[in-house]
Image: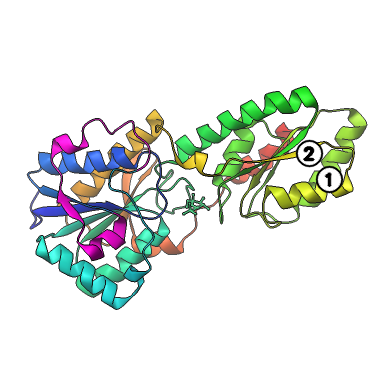
Amino acid sequence: MENNIKRIAVFTSGGDAPGMNAAIRAVVRTAYYHDLHVYGIYQGYEGMIEGKVERLETRDVGNIIHRGGTILKTARSERFRTPEGRKAAFETLSAYNIDGLIAIGGDGTYTGATIFAKEYDIPIIGVPGTIDNDLFGTDYTIGYDTAINTAVDAVDKIRDTADSHNRLFFVEVMGRDTGFIALSTGIGSGAGAVFLPEVTGEKEKLYDVLRKSTKRNKLFNIVIVAEGDELGGATKLAELVKKDFPQYDTKVTIIGHLQRGGSPTCRDRVLASMLGAGAVEGLLEGKKGCAVGVINHKLKYTPFKQAIEKHKELSDYLMRLAPILAI
Ligand code: F6P
């Protein structure tokens, strides 16, 4: 592989996601395999501004593949939104002679990278790391599989107590703007209904189902609600249902940040390993200003512009299936 890249840096940014450590490990080891020097930037763009940089050796990433969170820490940086912040960040990179960057995170991370690369012409490759799975250019993002398994495990436990008490539980999962987590959790846990940010007017359908199940004496006990659904989450929906169906004993569980932690699933570790290695090899092949993804089991590189502007769609088939399987 012919190129001028000798020293790269890697950082994680935005919300953490299980599997980010596996990606960092893959970046470091693939870089060493190709005789590159690697630096870790701590606390995302904020750490880049503040000069929080350390050399990473292959042994520094030993024993982390199974750990949730990110050894490089993460942050959401307001300062990086300013030209002064980005200038300070570039000065840090220059001080370490960094000639290639790997940014692990979500669309906010990609947006920051795009602006930075335009101003300073530094090769950057993004790695999709977010539990939300809402990034275009990859079938799955790092952390999504772990998050849905955590959510399904929680719902299985809730189902035991819901069933014992004949209660109706509204379980809120993460997903401010997209319903990937909610839809998979709903199907995977056999929920009676799923509320997604992408779909409006679902309350009437739920009411219909509740009326019918009361008549048929069907025990209906789990509703999955994405935090960003049109009604404003599980608590609001449960209040409405309680008012209109007082006969239901309703409860709310917000799974929250439990979904962001924990040991990554094997699927997330393998995906993260592929993406981390793919980012390094992409830089070596001269790719820049793009995000690496895995589509149909193969590495793909999507320009940041597309990865940010295009939206990955929820599966129509799964959306159609959810109510059918809840009959
Ligand atoms: O983007 C990932 C995500 O977990 C969202 O699903 C959630 O809405 C958000 O981050 C919460 O972010 P924070 O923990 O920074 O408040």
Q: Which residues are magenta?
A: 43-69
In this view, the residue in front, 204 or 71, is 71
Q: Give above or below for 228 relative to 142.
A: below
Check disc 1 and report the residue beneath it.
Answer: 242
For residue 231, side relative to residue 109 (left or right) = right
Q: Is residue 240 visible?
A: yes
The picture quadrant where one finds residue 89 is bottom left
Residue 206 percent across, percent down from the top left? 79, 45
Q: Give above or below for 44 relative to 140.
A: below
Residue 287 percent across, percent down from the top left? 21, 57
Residue 245 percent across, percent down from the top left? 88, 43
Q: Residue at x 76, y 55 (%)?
A: 201
For residue 67, side relative to residue 256 (left or right) = left
- Amino acid bearing label 1: Lys
In this view, the residue in front, 58 or 267, is 58
- Amino acid bearing label 2: Thr
Dot 2 alpha-carbon crowd within 10 angstroms: few under 14, some 14 to 19, many 20 or more: some
Residue 155 percent across, percent down from the top left? 62, 31
For the residues marked 2 and 1, what is the alpha-carbon distance in whole angstroms? 7 Å
Q: Is mark 1 within 8 Å of ligand 1?
A: no
Which of disc 1 and disc 2 is earlier in sequence?
A: 1
Residue lying at the far right in this picture: please name it.
215
For residue 60, side relative to residue 178 (left or right) = left
Q: Is residue 290 visible?
A: no
User: Dot 2: what SS?
Assistant: strand
- Residue 250's tag is 2
Q: Is mark 2 within 8 Å of ligand 1?
A: no
- The C terminus - image quarter: top right
Residue 130 magenta-drawn? no
Dot 1 alpha-carbon crowd within 10 angstroms: few under 14, some 14 to 19, many 20 or more: some
The picture quadrant where one finds residue 47 is bottom left
